[in-house]
Image (spheres, helix red, strand yellow):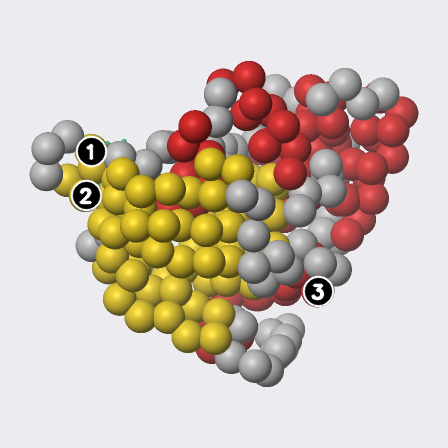
Amino acid sequence: MIEFQHVSKAFGNDIYALRDVSLTIGDGELVFLAGPSGAGKSTLLRMIAGLEKPSSGTVLMNGQNLGQLKASSLPYLRRKLGLILQGQGLLLDRSVLANVMLPMIVVGESTTEAETRARAALDRLNILDKAHASPLALSGGEQQRVAIARAIVNRPKIILADEPTAYLDRDNAIIVINALKAFQRSGVTCIISSHDEQFLEQANRVIYLSKGEVTDSWTSAVESVVAA
Ligand SMILES: Nc1ncnc2c1ncn2[C@@H]1O[C@H](COP(=O)(O)OP(=O)(O)O)[C@@H](O)[C@H]1O
Ligand SMILES: [Mg+2]
């Protein structure tokens, strides 16, 4: 469970990226974070990833205060998370497969196990045929699918995806959203930011941010699947 309790984040004296945000996200939920550019979506996601600390208020993950997390504890937090954040692109000097293996190599997994699971992750995103290609040879949609494969390869409990459909055409955007929804159905918490209204009707839960404040939120009882 993720809890924000009266969380504010100021940059400098008067830029508030988040202002008195309180919310709770339960295990296994699929949540869309909506709102225009500058609303605070990336800041909120980065806070859950331990990449930003609140200026005031508390962020708890399973009761643990992320604002008081020591740098040495960050790797343990990261292992629970699959991050698809802006500005964390694929490494261009190695193959798609090597990119997806990397998170496992970093945590000390054997090359054999890393390759097996990386291939399974690529297969799940329907892009195993590009395993030996350079990321440079891939379309934007394909690159985003590889980034998702890389994010899920450590079997995270929580996936954070910051505008994963930005720059994608509708068909690729649907593939990406459906892939994330499939993870949620297998029990993973998914928090997806988007300024693209077209996906919000598919969501179980939408939290609207504007100028750093939660302005609206709704939860639907019905699960729906995007028609491909
Ligand atoms: N590192 C930073 N330094 C200064 N201002 C920042 C920084 N990160 C975000 N901001 C500001 O905080 C506000 C929210 O940003 P952000 O969380 O990136 O919004 P969104 O992802 O919804 O577009 C914006 O006004 C942005 O300029
Ligand atoms: Mg953003």
Q: Is residue 30 above or below residue 154?
A: below
Q: Which mark is residue 219?
A: none
Residue marked by disc 2: 16
First along the sequence among labels 2 and 3: 2
Provide residue 16's location: percent of width, then percent of height.
19, 43
Image quadrant of ligand 1?
top left
Q: Are marks 2 and 1 in contact (CB under 8 Å)?
A: yes
Q: Amino acid at mark 3?
A: Arg
Q: Residue furthest left?
A: 14
120 left or right of 106 in image? right
Relative image position of residue 74 (x, y in whole percent) = 55, 25
Mark 2–mark 1 Cα distance, whole angstroms, equals 6 Å
Q: Secondary structure at mark 2?
A: strand
> Which residue in the protein does label 1 denote?
11
Residue 130 picture quarter? top right
**Compared with residue 172, is residue 198 higher up or lower down, i.e. above or below?**
below
> Which element carries disc 3, helix, strand or loop?
helix
Q: Would residue 142 be seen by someone viewing this image from the given angle?
A: no
**Is 107 situated above or below 207?**
above
Q: Which residue is mark 3?
A: 185
- The x, y position of residue 51, in whole percent, is 43, 31
- Mark 1 nearby-residue class (10 Å; few <14, some 14–19, many ≥20): few
For image coordinates 56% across by 59% down, the residue present is: 26
Amino acid under label 2? Tyr
